[in-house]
Amino acid sequence: MRRKLTFYMMLCTSFIAAAFYAQRALATPAVGFSGTTMGLGRFGGIEIFNQMVPRDGSGNIWLAWQKTIGMSDMYVQSNSWDPGGDTGWHSHPGASLIIVTSGAITAYEGSDSTCKPSVYTAGMGLVDAGGDHVHIIRNEGSVPATAIAVQLIPAGAVRRVDVDNPGNCPF
């Protein structure tokens, strides 16, 4: 009986280990992409509210609101893509503000069944909402591309989560 129990325990352990490694193998790692942390700061709760009353009377109002409860980590990342490089499909636990500093990058959303590309060139910015927002950013050009990203995430959280290819794009 004891041999049988030991056999079943080893078999279960093998299945669990295989499932763990199989899931990691399905993730889409970055290729021709590198990210360097330039700065990391920890903040307590944040409560910011701004409002600008329009000068021209057109009714346009600019609002900014950021509120966190508990500690947060803010990263400043320097990212670079070789021609043909990509970030792999991934998500982040919090929002990112990204400024393209050279070249061009193309973003694809995991939830977009049409796989519509959004191209950003030097001087343009894009927002990654974070949370369950799955995306990939590629350099589809012939020259290197660079960007700076500012990310605000829960303190101690993993900054980037590699995910499986959602299957909505042909690459």
Image: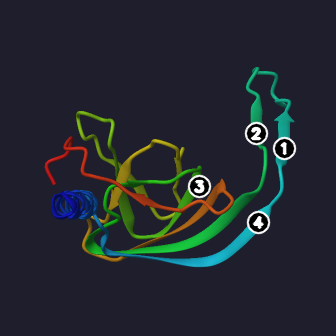
Q: CA distance from mark 4 to mark 1?
A: 16 Å
Q: Do labels 1 and 2 touch, CB within 8 Å?
A: yes
Residue indicated by mark 2: 64
Q: What's under tag 4, amino acid-wise?
A: Arg
Mark 2: amino acid: Ala
Residue at the disc numbered 1: 48
- Please state the horizontal and vertical placement of residue 58, each as a whole percent of the image: 75, 21
Reply above or below: 2 against 68: below
**Label 4, on which residue?**
42
Dot 4: what SS? strand
Comparing marks 4 and 3, which lies closer to the viewer? 4
* Distance Cα–Cα, label 4 vs label 3: 17 Å
- How far is the residue under mark 1 from the one under mark 2? 8 Å
Q: Quadrant of residue 9?
A: bottom left
Residue 15 in the image: state x and y as whole percent.
20, 58
Q: Is residue 151 left or right of residue 103?
A: right
Q: Residue, x 17% and y 60% (percent of image)? A: 11
For disc 3, the neighbor class at 10 Å (few under 14, some 14 to 19, many from 20) is some
Q: Secondary structure at mark 3?
A: strand
Which of the two discs, 2 and 4, labels the residue nearer the N terminus? 4
Residue bearing mark 3: 97
Query: What is the spatial separation of the Cα atoms under label 3 and label 2, in whole angstroms?
Result: 14 Å
Please give left or right for residue 87 compared with residue 21 in the image: right
